[in-house]
Image: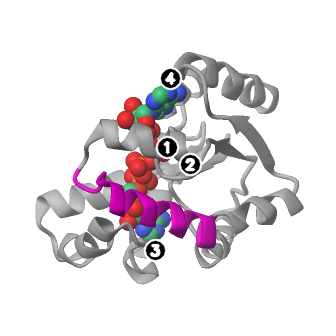
Amino acid sequence: MRIVLLGAPGSGKGTQTDAIIERYGVSTVATGDLLRAEVSAGTELGKRAKPYMDAGDLVPFDLVLGMIENGLNALARINPRGFMMDGFPRDLAQAEALDQLLAKINQPLDAVLFIEVDYEEIVKRLLGRGRADDNEETIRNRLRVFEEKTAPLIDYYKKKGLLHTVKGTGTVGDIGTRIRSILDAIA
Ligand code: B4P
């Protein structure tokens, strides 16, 4: 099974990941986690990415693409049960690059899950989480970036017949149940 988890920052993509991995045995590539690991390790990539992350902007495409290419090639080799992309793609250029990468390894997407959450609920959640990029100004910018750059992907994947919208409010368990009912049908 090959899926993309789409949603605004703070919509709960990372939160749902473990349950999806456990049930379907897929591996994940989470660009936010990969980028934060580069920042903590003090790599050149991490140093270049950090100012964008601190401001809530998208990290430039050339930095993210190499990371994704390596991650996907490795996943395709090691896990025949498939993968889940979390936080990638974030704009149309990334979505088109992903299509090309997947065509090259002959592993097209099966589904895209869009976790839909009201922006005011997101601000509340992220202020409560308190990660380095979770201050109100950065959160509001991340939401603007989502609206402008990532939200057009909803239509992009709808046209491809891949989109499933999941209501992202309620308990973590409620949302997990909604996700399972979609993924069980395609697993
Ligand atoms: P991400 O790491 O992707 O964003 P996130 O804020 O962690 O979102 P997620 O949806 O995973 O939220 P979570 O489950 O943790 O991106 C961070 C930054 O990295 C971006 O701003 C950008 O700079 C950069 N970046 C990443 N990918 C990129 C790319 N492809 N290209 C360019 N730049 C990129 O949930 C959030 C909070 O809500 C948690 O505290 C959680 O406990 C809570 N929560 C979850 N579900 C809940 C529920 N049902 N009810 C109440 N609270 C809930």
- Whether disc 2's CB lies below 8 Å from ligand 1 is answered no
SS for callout 2: helix
Residues at marks 2 and 3 touching, judged by CB atoms closer than 8 Å: no
Determine the image quadrant of residue 146: bottom right
Tell me the quarter of the image containing the N terminus: top right
Instruction: In the rendered view, tell whether residue 26 sits above or below residue 93.
Output: above
Q: CA distance from mark 2 to mark 3?
A: 28 Å
Q: CA distance from mark 2 to mark 1?
A: 5 Å
Q: Which residue is mark 2?
A: 119
- Magenta segment, principal secondary structure? helix
Q: CA distance from mark 1 to mark 3?
A: 27 Å
Q: Which residue is mark 4?
A: 22
- Whether disc 1's CB lies below 8 Å from ligand 1 is answered yes
The question of residue 141 being in magenta is answered with yes
Q: Residues within 10 Å of mark 1 (few under 14, many from 20)?
A: many
Of the residues under marks 4 and 3, which one precedes in the sequence?
4
Amino acid type, label 4: Glu
Amino acid type, label 2: Tyr
Q: Which residue is mark 1?
A: 122
Q: Residue at x 70, y 24 (%)?
A: 178
Residues at marks 2 and 1 touching, judged by CB atoms closer than 8 Å: yes
Magenta span:
132-150
Residues at marks 1 and 4 touching, judged by CB atoms closer than 8 Å: no
Q: CA distance from mark 4 to mark 2?
A: 29 Å
Where in the figure is residue 128, as x and y percent of width and height?
Answer: 32, 36
Question: Which dot marks residue 65?
Answer: 3
Q: Residues within 10 Å of mark 3 (few under 14, many from 20)?
A: some
Q: CA distance from mark 4 to mark 3?
A: 27 Å
Where in the figure is residue 136, as x and y percent of width and height?
Answer: 34, 55
